[in-house]
Structures are given as C-alpha cells and as structure tokens.
Amino acid sequence: KNEVEQSPQNLTAQEGEFITINCSYSVGISALHWLQQHPGGGIVSLFMLSSGKKKHGRLIATINIQEKHSSLHITASHPRDSAVYICAVIIYAQKLVFGQGTRLTINP
Amino acid sequence: KAGVTQTPRYLIKTRGQQVTLSCSPISGHRSVSWYQQTPGQGLQFLFEYFSETQRNKGNFPGRFSGRQFSNSRSEMNVSTLELGDSALYLCASSLVTGHTGELFFGEGSRLTVL
C-alpha cells in the first residue's frame, strides 16, 4: 500500500464547478506540499501546510494532521486549471514522499 | 529573479554509459533536492543537498550520486545506465533544508536510455 494516496486519480469537470482533490497518508508527517504539474513537466508549488487552512486566489488547501488527510479545493474552476495535482508529505523533515497525482481536466 | 535552471534539457544515452545532470538554484537558495519521475513510479525523492552536504537520501542504488558546490549549484550522476533509468529528472531549490520551505522546481532533464 502506498504511503500517500490521492483521489480521484482522474477528474473531468465543467468550467465553473467546485473541485476537490483528496490526499490521505499513512505515516507521521511534519507538513505537506500541494504541487501543480502542467504538460511538459514544469512543477509549481501551490501550498505547504502543517495545520489548518491556506487560501491563495481560487485555491484552498486544508489539512487535518490527526486524521492524516488533506484536501485541495478549486473554486470557479477554469480550463487553465487543467493540470496534474500532486500532494507530497514531508516525513520527519527528511524524505518527501509523493502521491500518484490527480489529473484534472476542466472543459469550457 | 532567475528561476531554477537545469541542463541539459534532453539527452539520449545507451546502456552502460554514465550521465551528469546540472541544477543551478535560485540565488540565495542553499538547498537543492533531486527527484526522478517515471510513468510507472511517479515522482520519487533521490537526495537533498544543503550547504554542500548531503542531508537526506531516498531509496535509490549507489549508481545515483550527487554533489553540491560552494555556489550551491548541484550535479547528479548516474553510472552504468539501465533502461529503467529513462525518466524526467527534476531538481528543486529552497531557502531551507528538509523540504520545509517553498520548493522551486526546474523544468527538468529528460533522459532516454537506449
């Protein structure tokens, strides 16, 4: 079983819909990253969080360390949000372990 | 402010050869970490360097090695290449060690092993 599980693996939605991507992990962590990867490979860091909630524009990330779960929400989704979203957990400030990614497609 | 620069962007090698990839971090960043991305295994952590010292290492064989120079530029080397080493190799720089700060990724070096 993978240490980090994301769901769903693939998500297709219409422009304007509210999007939720989930990340569950089975190990103790100190914090978690949400990353965005566009076709071609470039990765952009969206959030790093260890507790509570963070918001940046239309993106919101939440984490519950005790329940070993984090969510990434996108409000008013847009075709430019189409990308692969990856969560990565930091284990004891040493290793970074990645989820398998969620491929999001937003249709106009 | 210049971003993270990886060179070369693309390269083709044959089995048994070795390869060296380079990563220049954002000015002022002392942490450089390396990752391998393949369709089958996804993203996997290789190692992290901070102030010229390897701080953390993932579960890869000894054929994968790296180093960091005094100007924070880092290189990774893969010796005795295998077909399974074909991958996108990404580096990321950060102000702090242990992945506990914002990560800034390069565009990657795509290695094909024939």
Image (cartoon, coloured by chain):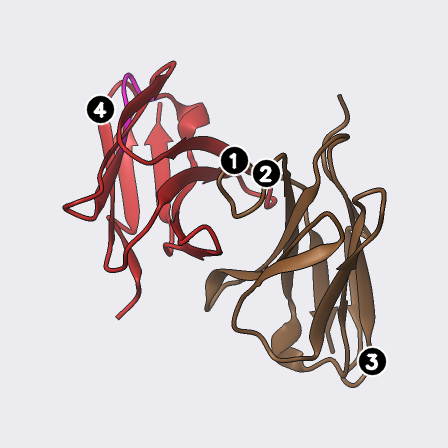
Q: Please tell me the numbered disc located at residue B96.
A: 2
- Residue at 72% x, 70% y: name it: B65
Q: Secondary structure at mark 3?
A: loop
Q: Reading the chain from its start, which is encountered first: label 3 or label 2?
A: 3
Q: Which residue is mark 3?
A: B17
Residue A64 figure quarter: top left
Question: How many residues crowd mark 4 within 10 Å: few (<14), some (14–19), many (20+)?
Answer: few
Looking at the rendering, the stretch of residues picked out in magenta corresponds to A72-77
The residues bearing labels 4 and 3 have C-alpha atoms spaced at a distance of: 49 Å
Q: Reading the chain from its start, which is encountered first: label 1 or label 2?
A: 2
Q: Please tell me the numbered disc located at residue B101.
A: 1
The residues bearing labels 3 and 2 have C-alpha atoms spaced at a distance of: 34 Å
Q: Specify whether disc 1 shares its chain with disc 3.
A: yes
Letter of the chain shown red in the rendering: A
Q: Which residue is mark 4?
A: A18
In the rendered image, residue B16, in percent from the top left (x then y), is placed at 79, 85
The chain under label 4 reads A
- Residue at 51% x, 45% y: name it: B99
In the rendered image, residue A86, in percent from the top left (x then y), is placed at 40, 45
